Structures are given as structure tokens and as C-alpha cells.
Image (cartoon, grey):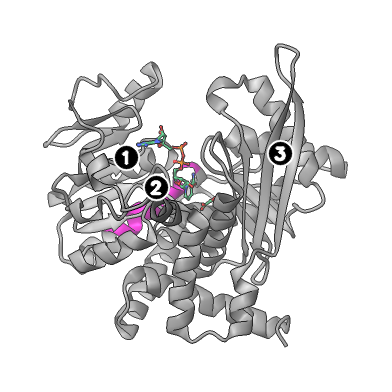
């Protein structure tokens, strides 16, 4: 929601600013220029390797036949199989999936795991579909992708409105076609179907690890740290829970239908129980209701946008008061807003670093499936912490060395790693 008073000048400017593919390109261009990446490599990295659109006929519960449109984009395979989630939402577009796929390429490179980037989406509204309808959509979508996915090719995972159950259906459909059980075709599966311990909390836990590093850098005490979280789903819900456990005060939670405030801190586990019971955070008795459009601009130390793209834009970035922005969502900040945040001196932990805990534990899941040997949660979390802490240090040190902000540093580091792999493989000769 953009407030009328803060709308950018024209609808065309707004469209440009909010188009995720153009936003991804703007960040790519900035990093490529700073790196002095040659034109040929820029061309290779600029466009996705593969864009697939499928139209999926599915019978609805009432007998009607409906056709749903789905996408899978593989942006780069230079460093390994494509990796990235699948989202179900009514407003999915090919440009959005392309942007998300390219962000996966850079994200996997930032945390230095052996994957390229991919992403998928199906235009549908899970809120009005039954479980049976969702299962039929998922299975038919998977069947259409059979030739392009696989443990060595492209390994999907959950994203918005998809979950362990969706991954189980994908694994089963793929396995039926291959006539053997192939657990490593997707990650984010249920534990007893080849899932990894720690995956459900991994993205939020990764947000915690990088936030703790930022607090340490600025000599801030977690016990004195006030946090605002937007989006109380997988990423935001777990990040809030783990930050609360680490001693921080989660003073506000913002959801699509309302926001909550308590200056003494909200207990995210109690709120999650309330949300599971009622379907909403609205009406939670241990916090006061506040304006959901204003909550992001509260005085706080850490803001965690963990809902969707483009929530921080040219019309509102100047109003952010947080000292640290930990981007749990993909693309929550527009490229134009980057400059405003930089001028304000806000320390941004960019999405391709901040939310990389999810794909990191997905990598661990893929490894465990292929080994047929499963790790305990302590080992998963310990290895995740090591990767997130080292990656934070890599990005921040790189930025300080090259005198660029953290997002540019993360992109430069990632582009450099992917370009190096391309050169080594000799694709670019
Ligand atoms: N699930 C994962 O492992 C990863 C997810 N992400 C990104 O994190 C973001 C959130 O993903 P998940 O938590 O998985 O999705 P989710 O569907 O579990 O949670 C999203 C939450 O945001 C809320 N929300 C939607 N619109 C909102 C609005 N306008 N204001 C406030 N809240 C709103 C929803 O009600 C929901 O509770 C997405 O950008 C996703 O791409 C990034 C890395 C990994
Ligand atoms: O776990 C994965 O493989 C991908 C998660 C994802 O889609 C993301 O990081 O945006």
C-alpha cells in the first residue's frame, strides 16, 4: 500500500520502480559497472538461461475445468544446478520470477554454495483453493517441468504459499515419472520424506545470525535492541521467535490485516499460537492495535521486512527510523530507495545475504538426501551459523575495502564468483 501523499511522480516511474526485473537489473548494472565486468560476461549474466511458461489444465472440485499459468526460470547454472523456491500467488508475473531467479544466483554465490539460481511460480489464489485442488495444480505443474528439474539440474523449494506438503507432492510426482524415489529433487520436504532438521526455521535463524553480527559491529546490546517485524509467516515468524529468544524486544509485528505494538516486547510464540487458533494476529490481547501502514516507521533498532517485495520505496524510505535493516523478504527495498537509505546511514543487510539461511539449509538437505545420511539439528544449525557469519564478514569487509554499501558489495562479490566460474568452465571463450 502506497500512501497517496508519498507516491512517486508518475505512474510510469512507479511501474519502473516496482518492476522486480528492472530492480534486479539496476542492482546488477551498478555492481557490473563497479567491478568493470566486460560486456560479454554482462550479456551472459543479464539474461536467464531458461524461461519456461506452462498452462496447466486442472479440474476444480465443482467439476469445472480451469487453466492455470505457471513459470520456472533458471537464471544461471554456472556454479551448479539451479536452486530456488516456487510461489503460489494471484499476482505472480514472469518478470517477478525472473528477478527472483537471478537473486537466487547471487544469493547462492554470496554464501558460496554450489548452486545456480532458479525460481518458479503459479498464478493461483491458495486462499480460495482446496487442498485437493492445490495438490492437482502442484502435480500437473511438476509433470510439465519433468524435463528441466532434477537433483543435478534444478532443485525447487518452498516460497510464499507453498510448504512441506507441496514439496512432498512434487517429490512424489517426479518419483512416479522416474519410477524410483528421488528425494533430492526438492528441498524443504517433511522430515520423514528426506527433509532436513532445521530447514523450517533456517531463513529466520539466518536473519538472527546476521543481525547479531551487525549488533556486535555497532557494539549494541541484544537486550537493549528493539525489533519491528513485517510479515508473520515462515520467515518473519521464526525470525521474531529466535530474536526474542536471543533477548531482543520485538516491539511490533505487522501483518496484512493489522499491526501490533507493545513497548515491553511481544512474545512471538504466544502470538503464533493465537494466529494459528484465530487465523489472524488482530485482536491479540497482549499488545495494542496500531496502524499497519505506520508501524514500519516506528523508532526501533532493527527492522525486518519479511513479507513481500517493494515495501520500502521512494515514497517512504525517508521515514524509516531503524538503524539496521535486515531484509528477510526477497526484494523488499526498491533500487531507488537504496540511495535514500544510504544517505540516512541505515545499515542494510541485503536480502541476498540476510535471507540466505533458507537456501543454505536446503543445500544441507540436498547433501543429506544424496548421502542417505541425516544430521542432527545441532550440526545443521552450527554449520548454518558458520556460513552466515563468514558471509556477513565477507560482504561487510568487501564493502569497506571498496567503499561501497553492503548491497553493492554483496552483488559485486556474487557477480565476481559467478563470472569466475563461467570463465573457468570456458563457456565464455
Ligand atoms: N520461506 C523461505 O525459506 C524463504 C522466503 N523468502 C522470502 O521471504 C518472504 C516471505 O516468505 P515466507 O515467510 O516463506 O512466506 P509466508 O507466506 O510464510 O509468510 C508471509 C507473511 O507475510 C504476510 N503478509 C503478506 N502481505 C503482507 C503485507 N502487505 N503486510 C504485512 N504482512 C504481509 C502474510 O500474511 C504471511 O503471514 C518472501 O519474500 C519470500 O520470497 C526468502 C528466503 C527463503
Ligand atoms: O531453499 C531454497 O532452495 C530456496 C529458498 C528461496 O526460494 C529463497 O531463498 O528465496
User: Which residue is at 21% across, 39% downward?
Assistant: 295
Q: Is residue 22 above or below residue 400?
A: above
Q: Position of residue 120 (x, y in %)?
A: 63, 47
Q: Secondary structure at mark 2?
A: helix
Q: Which mark is residue 204?
A: 2
Q: Secondary structure at mark 1?
A: helix
Ligand 1 lies in quarter: top left
Q: Position of residue 429 (x, y in %)?
A: 73, 88
Give the CA distance from mark 3 to mark 2.
Answer: 24 Å
User: Which residue is at 15% across, 50% downward?
Assistant: 223
Question: Which span is picked out in magenta?
Answer: 200-211
Foreground residue, 298 or 359? 298
Q: Disc 3 or 2, which lies upstream in sequence?
A: 3
Determine if residue 367 is in view. Answer: no
Q: Residue furthest top?
A: 62
Q: Which mark is residue 170?
A: 3
Q: Crowding near pointer 3: few (<14 within 10 Å), some, many (20+)?
A: many
Determine if residue 228 is in view. Answer: yes
Which quadrant of the figure contains the N terminus? top left
Q: Crowding near pointer 1: few (<14 within 10 Å), some, many (20+)?
A: many
Q: Is residue 355 above or below residue 78?
A: above
Residue indicated by mark 1 = 241
The secondary structure that most of the magenta stretch takes on is: helix
Amino acid at each position: 500500500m502506497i500512501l497517496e501523499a508519498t507516491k512517486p511522480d508518475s505512474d510510469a516511474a512507479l511501474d519502473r520502480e516496482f518492476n522486480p526485473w528492472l530492480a534486479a537489473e539496476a542492482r546488477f548494472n551498478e555492481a557490473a559497472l563497479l567491478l568493470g565486468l566486460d560486456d560479454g560476461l554482462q550479456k551472459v549474466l543479464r539474461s536467464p538461461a531458461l524461461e519456461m511458461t506452462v498452462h496447466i489444465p486442472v479440474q476444480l472440485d465443482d467439476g469445472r475445468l480451469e487453466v492455470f499459468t505457471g513459470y520456472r526460470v533458471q537464471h544461471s547454472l554456472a556454479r551448479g544446478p539451479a536452486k530456488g523456491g516456487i510461489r503460489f500467488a494471484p499476482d505472480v508475473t514472469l518478470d517477478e520470477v525472473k528477478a527472483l531467479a537471478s537473486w537466487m544466483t547471487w544469493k547462492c554465490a554470496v554464501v558460496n554454495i554450489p548452486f545456480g539460481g532458479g525460481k518458479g511460480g503459479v498464478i493461483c489464489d491458495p486462499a480460495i483453493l482446496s487442498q485437493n485442488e492445490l495438490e492437482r495444480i502442484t502435480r500437473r505443474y511438476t509433470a510439465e517441468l519433468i524435463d528441466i528439474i532434477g537433483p543435478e539440474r534444478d532443485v525447487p523449494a518452498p516460497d510464499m504459499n507453498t510448504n512441506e506438503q507441496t514439496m512432498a507432492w512434487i517429490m512424489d510426482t517426479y518419483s512416479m515419472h522416474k519410477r524410483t524415489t528421488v528425494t533430492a529433487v526438492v528441498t524443504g520436504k517433511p522430515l520423514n520424506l528426506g527433509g532436513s532438521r532445521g530447514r523450517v526455521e533456517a531463513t529466520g535463524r539466518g536473519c538472527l545470525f546476521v543481525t547479531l553480527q551487525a549488533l556486535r559491529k555497532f557494539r549494541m546490546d541484544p537486550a537493549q535492541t528493539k525489533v519491528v517485524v513485517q510479515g508473520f509467516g515462515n520467515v518473519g515468524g521464526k525470525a521474531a521467535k529466535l530474536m526474542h529468544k536471543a533477548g531482543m524486544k520485538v516491539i511490533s509485528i505487522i501483518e496484512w490485516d493489522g499491526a501490533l505494538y507493545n513497548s515491553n516486547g511481544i512474545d512471538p510464540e504466544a502470538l503464533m499460537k493465537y494466529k494459528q487458533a484465530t487465523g489472524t494476529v488482530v485482536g491479540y490481547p497482549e499488545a495494542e492495535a496500531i496502524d499497519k501502514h505506520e508501524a514500519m516507521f516506528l523508532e526501533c533498532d532493527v527492522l525486518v521486512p519479511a513479507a513481500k517485495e517493494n515495501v520500502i520505496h521512494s515514497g517512504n524510505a525517508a521515514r524509516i527510523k531503524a538503524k539496521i535493516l535486515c531484509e528477510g523478504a526477497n526484494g523488499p527495498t526498491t533500487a531507488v530507495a537504496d540511495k535514500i537509505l544510504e544517505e540516512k546511514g541505515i545499515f542494510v543487510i541485503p536480502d541476498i545475504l540476510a535471507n540466505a539461511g533458507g537456501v543454505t539449509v536446503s543445500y544441507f538437505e540436498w547433501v543429506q538426501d544424496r548421502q542417505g545420511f541425516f544430521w542432527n539439528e545441532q550440526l545443521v544449525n552450527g554449520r548454518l551459523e558458520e556460513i552466515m557469519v563468514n558471509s556477513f564478514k565477507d560482504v561487510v569487509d568487501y564493502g569497506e575495502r571498496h567503499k561501497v554499501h553492503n548491497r553493492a558489495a554483496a552483488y559485486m562479490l556474487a557477480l565476481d564468483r559467478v563470472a569466475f566460474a563461467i570463465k573457468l568452465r570456458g563457456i565464455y571463450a
